[in-house]
Image (cartoon, rainbow, N blue to C red):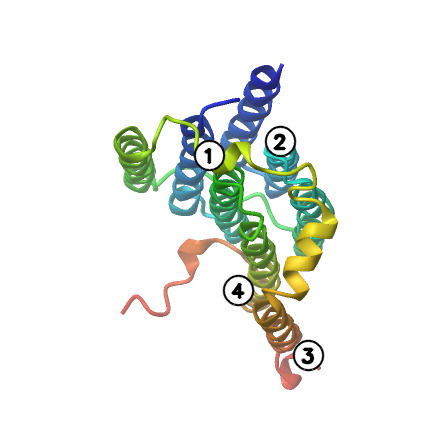
Amino acid sequence: MIPLSHYLLLSAIIFGLGVVGVIISRNLIKLLMSVELMLNAANLVFITFARWYGDPGVHIFVFIVFVVAAAEAAVGLSLVIAVFRRKESVDVDILRLLKG
Amino acid sequence: MDAIVFWIAAGVAVAAAVNLIIQARPINSVLSLVVVLFALAVIYLQLSAEFIAALQIIIYAGAIMVLFLFVVMLLNLKQGDEEGRRGVLHSFGLLLGGAILLEISIVIRLFVPSAIHPGAQAITSNFGSVGQIGRLLFDDYLLPFELTSILLLITVAGALVLAAGRREERE
């Protein structure tokens, strides 16, 4: 059996890549996809510990994270469409209405 | 054999995740994310989470990613000046990502037990099967399950309101 720390380290790497993607990407769609990457890293930790402690109830929380990810993608992408309709672009740098 | 499958899946997942970030075109990023999801589904199967692995492919790769693809195709994005004038933010992002990775690795090293938990051996053959998860979902976790349906209902309304725009803009 593969040690627990390998799975957790893989999840940490994917989460870190998601953080990097959220900060450096200028495209709103890519930014949303990096958030999905971070949600997947969290899911991997859930599944790993479900197997580790032999508790199938944890799988329900992964199921709920799926639903939250779907909701986040739907609302986020409709925001992207609304931004594109107004500004003709999905660049995060043009959204400076709140910058003061 | 177990280890080989894990290392291949993990390598593919990390490589595709890096590719997601560095690709300039959004469509390439969407397809990279699909690859990440498939690689993670393999790892879920290894951790005997069969139902979740199937859901990962059907819902995540099949439905959510198609939503992303539709929006990417719908918007017909112009190829802008992708790089440049963000040098500070690039290094800050890499620094923050590296710091988070380092922090989590230290926590894993210090606090994660290396001995195998007795629960890991005690799992039955139907662990993570559709029947078991379904029984839990409609019995012990019925309230969270019902709450997700309300979340989805609100999402439908919110997405419609946001994407449809105001009436005078549409005409």
Identify the secondary structure beneath mark 3.
helix
Q: Which residue: 62% across, 59% down?
A: A70
Mark 4 against mark 2, which lies toward the viewer? 2
Residue named by callout 3: B170
Could you say which disc has been placed on residue B118 in the image?
1
To which residue does mark 4 refer? A87
Same subunit, tags 3 and 4: no
Residue A52, visible in the rendered structure: no
* Mark 2–mark 1 distance (CA, rounded to whole Å): 28 Å
SS under mark 4: helix
Q: Amino acid at mark 2?
A: Ala
Provide residue A3's location: percent of width, then percent of height: 45, 24
B94 sits left or right of B121 in the view: left
Q: Quadrant of residue A73?
A: bottom right
Q: Which residue is mark 2?
A: B39
Q: Name the amino acid type tagged 3.
A: Arg
Label 4 resides on the chain identified as: A
Let me know if residue A1 appears in the view: yes
